[in-house]
Image (tube, rainbow, N blue to C red):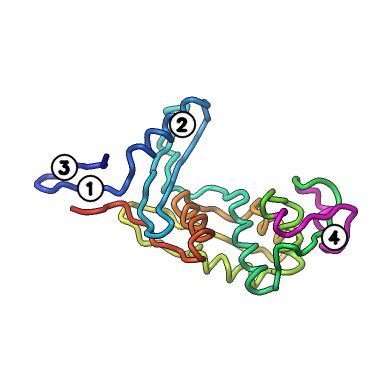
Amino acid sequence: GQDIQKIGDYTVVYTVDPTVQEEAEKVFKEYSVPYGVLAAINPETGAVLGFASYANNKKKSAEISPLIAYPPGSLAKIITASAAIESKGFYPGLNICYNGTLYGTDKTNWEQNIGTGSNDISFKEAFAKSCDVAFGKIAGYYVGRKLLSQYFDKFHFNKKIPFILNLQESTAYIPKKFYQLELTGAGFENVKITPIQAAMIAASAINGGRLVEPYIIKEV
């Protein structure tokens, strides 16, 4: 099927796939999520395939949208990983040592070099398991503030992305303080991203590193 809208004398055909929309809305309701947003794009073309939002509290529904920027969580690790691989020679089998658990923000564990700690994990596994402490150390000890800032810019943060709808700007501030820098590289602080841009970044991980420009109108 197609998502079609009549506007005056014009017929607008959208790229959105009704099946994707229906499935997203079904899952949101089935699991009773307080808030949920879906933004799905074709990783090769940038066509928006899914564009849905949901809120249990209808009064909050206006605040939930694929066009609004939110904290990124572990999506920020994709950017930190890109900087580490392209500019610091990181490879899948590189060993990262750490103390404590894979997750959490215990400052004492984060302020140790990746060669220090009683536990270890490969860079590949750290990425697959979204290991917080490993990526904090990578951001702080290896990537650093200047390079991390450059890579957030490469992924189109702090700039307007062309889109027919009013898409908020995704923002990233890279702090000077070491621990805050680590937290930023692992996705805990100082960054906000729209679901549309999050989909763009996820797409770049499987299409050879290209950031495709999103579009939602197929034809008029």
**Residue type highlighted by circle 2:** Ala
Please identify the residue farthest to the right as the structure is shown.
Answer: 118
C-alpha gap between disc 2 and disc 1: 27 Å
Q: Closer to the observer: label 1 or label 3?
A: 1
Which residue corresponds to mark 1? 13
Q: Nearer the viewer, mark 2 or mark 3?
A: 3
Per the image, the residue denoted by label 3 is 6
Q: Give the alpha-carbon distance from disc 4 to disc 2, as whole Å.
A: 41 Å
Question: Residue 93, percent across and down?
Answer: 75, 63
Q: Secondary structure at mark 2?
A: strand
Marks 4 & 3, CB-CB < 8 Å contact: no
**Mark 1 or mark 4: whose residue is earlier in sequence:** 1
The earlier-in-sequence mark between 2 and 1 is 1
Using a 10 Å C-alpha cutoff, classify the residue at mark 3 as few (fewer than 14 neighbours), some (14 to 19) or many (20 or more): few
Which of the two residues, 165 or 14, is positioned nearer the viewer here?
Answer: 14
Give residue 94's position: percent from left, percent from top. Answer: 76, 64
The residue to which callout 4 is attached is: 112
Q: Which residues are magenta?
A: 105-126
Does residue 121 show up magenta in the picture?
yes
Q: Earlier in the sequence, mark 4 or mark 2?
A: 2
Give the class, few, some or many, for how many residues have Cα within 10 Å of label 1's Cα (few <14, many ≥20): some
Determine whether label 4 and label 2 are within 8 Å by CB: no
Q: Is residue 75 left or right of residue 176?
A: left
Residue in the picture at 52% in, 30% down? 34
- Using the image, determine if residue 181 lies above or below residue 86: above
Q: Earlier in the sequence, mark 4 or mark 3?
A: 3
- What amino acid is labelled 3 in the image? Lys
Residue at 70% over, 61% down: 181
